[in-house]
Image: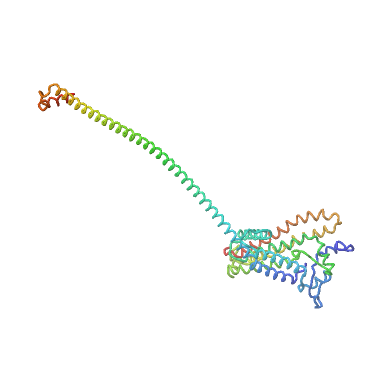
Amino acid sequence: MNINLTLIGQTIMFAMFVWFCMKFVWPPLVETMAARKKSIEDGLKAAELGKEEHALAQKNAEDLIETSKTQAAEIIANADKQAVVMIDNAKGAASEEADKIKAQAKSELDQEVTKVRNELKDQVSTLVMQGVNSVLDKEVDSKTHKDMLSKLSKSL
Amino acid sequence: MASGELTSGAYIKHHLQNLTYGKFPDGHWGFAHTSEEAKEMGFMAVHVDTLGFSFVLGALFLFLFARAAKKASIDAPSGFQNFVESIVDFIDENVRGSFSGKNPMVAPLALTTFIWIILMNTMDLVPVDWLPSLFHAMGVEYLKVVPTTDPNATFGMSIGIFILILYYSVKEKGLGGFLGELTLHPFGKWMLPANLFLEGVNLLAKPVSLALRLFGNMYAGEMIFILIALLPFWIQWSLSLPWAIFHILIVLLQAFIFMTLVIVYMDMAHQKEH
């Protein structure tokens, strides 16, 4: 319990310890802790950023899918419409063609009928002429009565 | 008890005597064999046990913390590293809270006082007879294992703090500023002697109260452990265990108070305006 040189010894020892602590213990520890704190903060910030980017990307993807869906629906609708139009067109064209063919066949038939009728007329008039010739012999000049005959044949 | 034939008074006295190495009145140096011899040596003596234990404990603290500082990396800390960092964080927080100046020495100073005092105080929790008996078997007559129960240790620290207070007061405020602080407050310049007296007491009370508070607490705690050790061995645990558990609080609290006051005193030394 006596105060003696120990006092000075303890003071010197204390000063040495504080100096050592200040030189070799405190700064590296505090620096490391600050560096770690910073790296953790950076990591958290990066994670936050990544999260935001992820959300954005997801939103973009969703938007893209949404537009794709609408586009696809539009395309399908258009295709349907087009198909209907095409079918209608085809139907129209087919019926037109059929009408044309029918008309052509009819006109051909008419022509044939006319032709046949004319032939028949000619033949009948010839036949008549022959008949008349044979009846009247030379009394009837074929040239003189040709007009009459042709009129007759026309009226047939 | 150290030995059966000792009286209680002698036992207590023996436990309170430091291992003293010093200059005998006749001029030769040597270990004191009795308390009277130690007293006669006066100032020219050292307490080998106080110096030894405090040095070993301080070196242990610095060794462990320096190793942790060396191994520290920004990867996740583990084990002792984590423990060291949480203490550093705690000290750093305290210094930031109480110290407003800029001085890279204050935080290491606080850390050193805190841990060193904790370690020295913790020696009080070692049963009072273990180490003295062990050293007695090796031929050492006296041994006081708790350096903070030696006023030399507590005053040694507080004198160091006092020197720092004076140094930084003069450095930060200038000699005139510091002297003005001592003489012109609180009553103005016409009451200079009264001011000097009041401020002088205030200034000197800082190291004295620091040292005496720590010393008194630890000395009283040690004393109670010694008194408990005088009881029959089969009943000792019923008192020494509760006292030891309570003493853990005192060990930490006294170290914390000392550290906090050191930070506050350093802050006051750095403040330019009174």
Q: Quadrant of the C terminus of chain B?
A: bottom right
- In the displayed structure, B125 sits above or below A58; it is below
Q: Is residue B37 left or right of residue A29?
A: right
- In the displayed structure, B15 sits above or below B30; it is above
Q: Quadrant of the N terminus of chain B?
A: bottom right
Nearest the eye: A51 or B161: A51
Where residue B248 sits: x, y (%)?
74, 57
> Residue drawn at (20%, 27%), measured in percent from left and top?
A123
**Quarter of the view holding residue A126:** top left
Q: How many marks?
A: 0
Where residue B104 sits: x, y (%)?
60, 66
Nearest the eye: A116 or B221: A116
**Quarter of the view holding residue A69:** top left
Q: Is residue B252 left or right of residue A58?
A: right
Residue at the far top: name it: A135
Q: Is residue B124 left or right of residue B160?
A: right
Residue at the far right: name it: B5
Q: Is residue B248 at least partly visible in the picture?
A: yes
Nearest the eye: B237 or A32: A32
> Residue drawn at (76%, 74%), measured in percent from left and top?
B44
**Quarter of the view holding residue B92:** bottom right
> Residue drawn at (86%, 57%), measured in percent from left and top?
B233
Q: Is residue B162 at least partly visible in the picture?
A: no
Where residue A41 sits: x, y (%)?
56, 56
- In the displayed structure, B191 sits above or below A89; it is below
Coloration mode: rainbow
Where residue B62 sits: x, y (%)?
69, 66
